[in-house]
Amino acid sequence: MYIPKHFDEPKVERLHELMRDQPLATLVTFSSHGLNADHLPLHLTETSNSLGTLRGHVARANPLRSHLGEHAEVLAIFRGSDAYITPSWYATKAETGKVVPTWNYVVAHAYGTLRFLDDAAWLRAHLEALVTHNEAAFDKPWQLSDAPHDFIEKLIGAVVGIEITITRLLGKWKVSQNQPSENKMGVINGLRESGTAKALDMADLIERAN
């Protein structure tokens, strides 16, 4: 990924925050069958590895396991907020006219080695952690124990666990850092006036980064 210096986000804690808030990752793999991309939630866990470990699962019918060997190199992409930026928001438009549209976005790329886990106890613990994390915002969080035991056991038997040890973590925060302050303020105001959830999130990101 091309990352100009002013868009580089080296803080691991900020990248981890994005990965926790937006866990639906694009998992990119390469094998003798060519390039492949799967879309699945990956749960970031704290381990002895300072960059973290990602855990998830795929359907047993997914050919990913048969296509990849153990400890295959993979890339997990996590996307945060993004927004179209119109040059009409730039104060310098009236001064020089030398402005063009762009697209702001934040993204984290997690490179690592993948291993498969076909262990019912591991899968149950992983699913419980995944459910607990994602149900936390609800008044009455659903739990695995809410469903019949044999039903859950059957579903666990239909999936295979994956664990990715992160070896490299890159972050790109393209949030108007290359614009003068008057243009940044124009973008923030324009996004807030738009009022959509994505626009408001991007306005917050610009304020935090600048």
Image (spheres, rainbow, N blue to C red):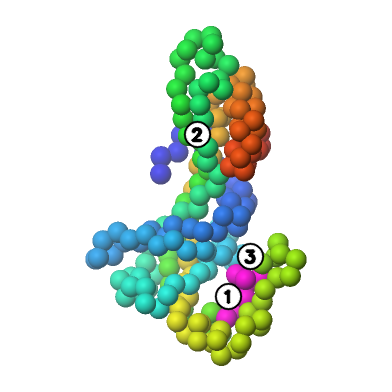
Q: Which mark is residue 134?
A: 3
Viewer-nearest residue: 168 or 29: 29
Q: Looking at the image, can residue 187 be seen? A: yes
What residue type is disc 2 on?
Tyr
What residue type is disc 1 on?
Leu
Does residue 206 appear to the left or right of 138 in the view shown? Answer: left
Q: Which residue is mark 2?
A: 84
User: Quadrant of the image for the N terminus?
Assistant: top left
Q: Position of residue 152 (x, y in %)?
A: 56, 84
Counting residues from the start of the chain, the first of labels 1 and 3 encountered is 1
Q: Position of residue 89 (x, y in %)?
A: 56, 22
Secondary element at image label 3: helix
- The crowd level at tag 1 (other Cα within 10 Å; few <14, some 14-19, many 20+) is many
Q: Position of residue 71 (x, y in %)?
A: 39, 70
C-alpha distance separating marks 3 and 2: 29 Å
Counting residues from the start of the chain, the first of labels 3 and 2 encountered is 2
Secondary element at image label 1: helix
Residue occupying the far top of the picture: 95
What residue type is disc 3 on?
Asn
